[in-house]
Amino acid sequence: MTYLLLFWEFFKTGLFAIGGGMATIPFLYDLSDKTGWFTRNDLANMIAVGESTPGPIGVNMATYVGFVTGMKDGGVLTAILGAVTATIGLITPSLIIVLIVAMMLKSFRDNEYVNNAFYGLRPASTGLIAAAGFTVVCSTLFYSDIWAQGNLLSAFNWKGIVLAIVLWLLTNVVKPTKKLHPIVFIGISALVGIMLQMK
Amino acid sequence: MKKLLELFLIFAKVGVMTFGGGYAMLPILQREVVENKGWATEEELMDYFAIGQCTPGVIAVNTATFIGQKNKGVAGAILATLGVVFPSLVIISLLAGVIEAFSHIIWVQNAFGGIRVCVCVLILNAVVKLLKKAVVDIPTGMIFAAVALCSILLPVSPIVFVLIAAVTGIILKAIGGKKQ
């Protein structure tokens, strides 16, 4: 039953995530909240792994989520079954839609309604990713027990905030490092995390 | 039959060589599919890529489906698509197994503590890049802000926003078109 649900959830993700791999992230956050199959922290780890391994990010994320979900069901075999189920679920809508579009290629691209729908879809998809990013930032750079600790300053993950600022500068401002592949920054962050004992 | 196997293998190769998002795949596709195999022309590849971005799903998968379909019909589409996801399945399954097994070790947790900070920055960078393409005028800016805000505040499935945005796009353009 879990596998059927897993397929269905990723089928919906594949159908409604528009504009590439990052667009699947808001759906995965929604899935995490809804099912509890994996935590939000798990998801941030999965994004990092998906970015730093070969293959399209969206597919990597689906495989990872499926694997972790299946793992809960027993062991390695169910984990692999979960990985395959989620991945097939993600690509099935693409397969169907692209096959249909391929048959009427020209008319799809020139269709007024399709273009107009995408005029609204592109900013919406970006908005969803921004919202997911905001959630990741909140759970990573601020601690949720902000009031329990009583001390406002201790609610901030200071090490994390400094690292984030440095990484932002390295990926946007510093010329020699700007064009480097994300995997480089993920590697650096892992080392910094170990050295500063980040949580 | 031989060509179907070839579609699977070449796209598996493309999958292995793609690090990150769909755009990273373009130069590899140009070399393997256009130059080496001649399965599509440069122009066709650009067309597939453009349409791949505005059909639902992962761009890499969409492009593979297009090229497979063009060369070997439905079977070709399925095999090319399976090819592109095959390396992910193998690599991620192995890696996820290893990570799960070592996740209790403190320095692994620390490493991921650092990595999560990096993920924040990577998502931020992705959003900024997408914004430049998606927000082209005031209405699209408002759609972006409204969706981002509502998605943070309301426990609503992203599907709802996607559907509303598509309809809004069509309506906005219809109103704008009449004025001209």
Image (cartoon, coloured by chain):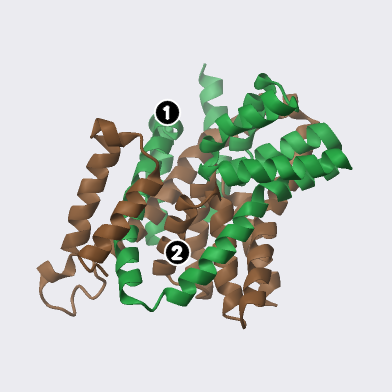
Chain colours: A brown, B green
Quadrant containing the C terminus of chain A is: bottom left
Q: Position of residue A17 (x, y in %)?
A: 57, 49
* Quarter of the image where one finds residue B136: top left
Position of residue A7 relative to residue B36, above or below, is: below
Which residue is rendered at x = 52% and y = 64% of the image?
Answer: B95
Residue B78 located left or right of residue B88: right
Output the chain of dot 2: A
Mark 1 and mark 2: span between their CA atoms? 31 Å
The residue closer to the viewer here, B136 or B99, is: B99
Quadrant containing the N terminus of chain A is: bottom right
The residue closer to the viewer here, A1 or A176, is: A176
Q: Secondary structure at mark 2?
A: helix
Q: Is residue A57 visible?
A: yes
Residue on which disc 1 sits: B136
Q: Secondary structure at mark 1?
A: loop
Output the chain of dot 1: B
Which residue is rendered at x = 66% and y = 20% of the image?
Answer: B43
> Residue A47 shows which numbered tag?
none
Q: Position of residue B178 (x, y in %)?
A: 56, 21
